[in-house]
Image (cartoon, coloured by chain):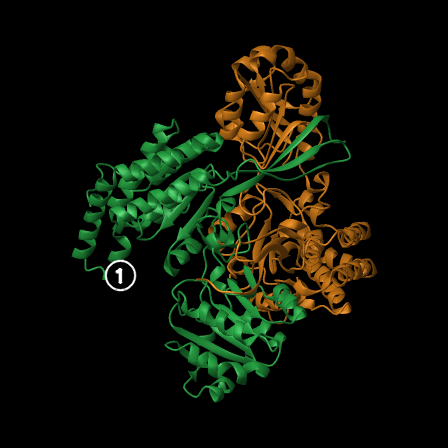
Chain colours: A orange, B green
């Protein structure tokens, strides 16, 4: 990595992003869309330079003995750069979230109150190796009228710098301030902590990375943040389930893409359905390691024993815990006790069971008779997504553009005074 | 203060509140309302014991040399207890925020997606001297289906304990778990920090107190929180303002109750209106110390000079800064640079100026031709309020019951699998 001659201090960069956010936030819809389209074109035009910068990152990672799968996440190709450009063009085509009036009313004294969707201001994103996050995050921020304040990993520094340069060039080209996208180039841990504490300038922090990054945010951040949490997702197969439907949902949820947060990790089954369901499910889940309680193991002798830790584990792999319960209440209690509040499924034909599960299970998303794999911004119709929040404040579930905005009250009167 | 025989550790109390929150959250609307009504009745019935407990707090505060105005905030009387009971009865009468479907749509694959208002779970409130916050906060939490996890000040410990006992008795009486209201009785600083870090159990923390409490939350909390921020509120009197209306709004905003966060702190006036407005305004603001820039002082010779610090200060007193500007742009720039994002007023008859101010001023509430003093939960029609948020995530502006809830996605299908 070629160190820049002087590294700009984090607060100065944050202040520049804040100043730019004032202009980005009041730019017209076409101006913001033009910036995204220009950035898409420039990414393609500069694909070669971006890939060269990336090659330097990849070479350094190789020399440092970085594992191959991490190098793969880091590596860009002309095709990957084109995909990044395509992502920006897509975001440009979405409806503008700003200016939407979500509700309004008139008070007895004649004051008219409206709640209007407005930009957050500066959205800070701290993320790990994949350099495409640089353009993805910047694109979503600009579309929603925010400045993007970015801190990528040191391993992708050259790539991130090249992509940021393109985004800034695009802003300049359409008459918006280049500081609408600002990258922190100080790769130190101290700078990361400083990044999370720019309370005067940052309106929202979004960490995109593993558990240690999340823990660092919890420990250090003084700015408001939205956390993309773990998914220990359950499917509960009720006594009144259509067992064919249940089999499809369990197999799809577990095996279609086991490494993601909306994949199933645990199967909870009513004791009345267990004998009919479990042996066939175990056969259909060929290649998945199952661990369960005694009653499940009695029905599927090849199943290992599940510990309490198993029921609390997000495997993100071809492994699944199984628990037999005697009632809907027991299922809900188990899921609320062991789940992470991400996505929870019930398969049932019993309306009352479905409604009770939907009301009592405490999760961002509760699904009735559908695969947990649908919990995703695109599948929900939000276009691309920034993540899936398991926190309850501000944003819960798939994060779309709307979650990069805030609401502002506008009150109109004709001279009202308070008595 | 009579120390309890053994003080229960904070995490154990938090876990109890969490367990209770599962039951409170699924209790019917009438059950939650009955709990509030029962608590109101019991407060009145036990007013004598509550006042006795309070007398012990007041006596201790007196012995410790606490200033008289703080002792007054601490003191309860039978009338104050009755007012607390009246508050609970009022909250019981409001509509239930839970179960509201805020939006919903159907995807091309037939999945029906709804967003439904649900309780947060455990709402933690940390607050300073006033013991009435104990019943107010508990009432709002229970109404919105949450357990209340409370940490008052040590100075009000006996009062808070007595009020909490009544709330718990009311819950028990209507068949809800008493742990729906839990008070932390450990008055140590370490316990306060621990209180802010119960991430496994607490869904939202609301601090109610001064700047040092807020700073402690920023420094220590790992749970999500909503901050009730300072209000350095401006009124901008435009060139096109009705100056009589402007005078009323400025005097009302500054003097009707100067000690609160929605009071005006600064007057910004267009240079074209300054000569006609400032001398009369200074006369009408008799008793208010004015400090201003050179042009303002030329028009009002009695005015002191304003420093940069003045323009950044929330006086909460009969003092006001004055600034003359040459354009709407300058006014907006000054307000965004010096304001705290609370409430900002424009007085104008110019529609374009009003609309631009509403869009470009970055504040929880922007008011056109109305007093800033209307920025208040009751004045907005929310019933009582928990505070006024100046943060942009989750809740911005006056906090009502709705802000004590979250949204949950409920997805209904008939066996959809992801391809």
Residue A130 in the figure: left or right of residue B184: right
Which sits in the foreground, B60 or A291? B60
Disc 1 is attached to a residue of which chain? B
Query: What x and y, as percent, mark residue B142?
Result: 43, 38
Q: Is residue B321 above or below residue B381?
A: below
Q: Quadrant of the C terminus of chain B?
A: top right
Within 10 Å of disc 1 (Cα), the crowding (few <14, some 14-19, many 20+) is few
Residue B37 in the figure: left or right of residue B58: right
Count of labels shown?
1
Q: Is residue A409 above or below residue B167?
A: below
Residue identifier under label 1? B69
Q: Is residue B321 above or below residue A331?
A: below
Identify the residue shown where x is 34% and y is 36%. B39
Query: What x and y, as percent, mark residue A322?
Result: 57, 21
Query: What x and y, as percent, mark residue A292?
Result: 55, 19
Identify the residue shown where x is 21% and y is 41%. B48
Outermost residue to the left: B63
Q: Is residue B337 above or below residue B170?
A: below
Quarter of the rendering containing residue B69: bottom left
Regarding residue A98, the answer to whether it shows in the image is yes
Helix, strand or loop at label 1? It is helix
Identify the residue shown where x is 56% and y is 46%. A227
Residue B256 in the figure: left or right of residue B249: left
Which sits in the foreground, A175 or B236? B236
């Amino acid at each position: 990595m070629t160190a820049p001659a002087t590294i700009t201090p984090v607060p100065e960069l944050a202040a520049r992003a804040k100043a730019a956010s004032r202009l980005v936030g009041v730019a017209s819809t076409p101006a913001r869309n033009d910036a995204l389209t220009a950035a898409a074109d420039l990414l393609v035009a500069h694909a070669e330079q971006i890939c060269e910068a990336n090659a330097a990152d990849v070479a350094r990672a190789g020399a440092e003995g970085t594992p191959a799968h991490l190098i793969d996440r880091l590596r860009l190709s002309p095709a990957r750069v084109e995909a990044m450009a395509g992502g920006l063009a897509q975001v440009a085509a979405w409806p503008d979230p700003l200016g939407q009036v979500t509700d309004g009313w008139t008070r007895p004294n004649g004051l008219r109150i409206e709640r209007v969707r407005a930009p957050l201001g500066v959205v800070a994103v701290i993320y790990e190796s994949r350099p495409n996050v640089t353009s993805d995050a910047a694109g979503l921020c600009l579309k929603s009228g925010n400045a993007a304040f970015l801190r990528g990993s040191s391993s992708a520094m050259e790539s991130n710098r090249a992509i940021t340069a393109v985004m800034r060039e695009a802003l300049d080209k359409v008459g918006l301030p280049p500081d609408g996208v600002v990258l922190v180039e100080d790769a130190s841990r101290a700078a990361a902590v400083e990044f999370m504490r720019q309370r005067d300038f940052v309106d929202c922090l979004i960490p995109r990375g593993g558990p240690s990054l999340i823990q660092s945010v919890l420990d250090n951040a003084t700015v408001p943040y939205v956390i993309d949490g773990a998914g220990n997702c359950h499917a509960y197969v009720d006594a009144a389930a259509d067992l064919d439907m249940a089999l499809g949902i369990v197999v799809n949820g577990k095996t279609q893409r086991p490494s993601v947060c909306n994949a199933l990790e645990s199967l909870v089954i009513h004791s009345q359905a267990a004998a009919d369901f479990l042996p066939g499910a175990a056969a259909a889940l060929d290649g998945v390691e199952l661990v369960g309680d005694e009653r499940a193991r009695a029905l599927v002798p090849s199943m290992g024993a599940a510990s309490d830790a198993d029921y609390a584990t997000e495997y993100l792999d071809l492994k699944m815990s199984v628990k037999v319960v005697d009632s809907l209440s027991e299922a809900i209690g188990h899921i609320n006790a062991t789940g992470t509040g991400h996505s929870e499924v019930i398969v049932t034909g019993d309306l009352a069971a479905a409604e009770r599960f939907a009301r009592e299970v405490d999760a961002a998303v509760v699904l009735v008779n559908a695969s947990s794999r649908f919990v995703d911004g695109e599948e929900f119709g939000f276009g691309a997504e920034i993540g899936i929040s398991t926190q309850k404040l501000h944003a819960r579930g798939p994060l779309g553009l709307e979650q990069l905005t805030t609401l502002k009250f506008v009150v109109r009167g004709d001279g009202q005074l308070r008595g």
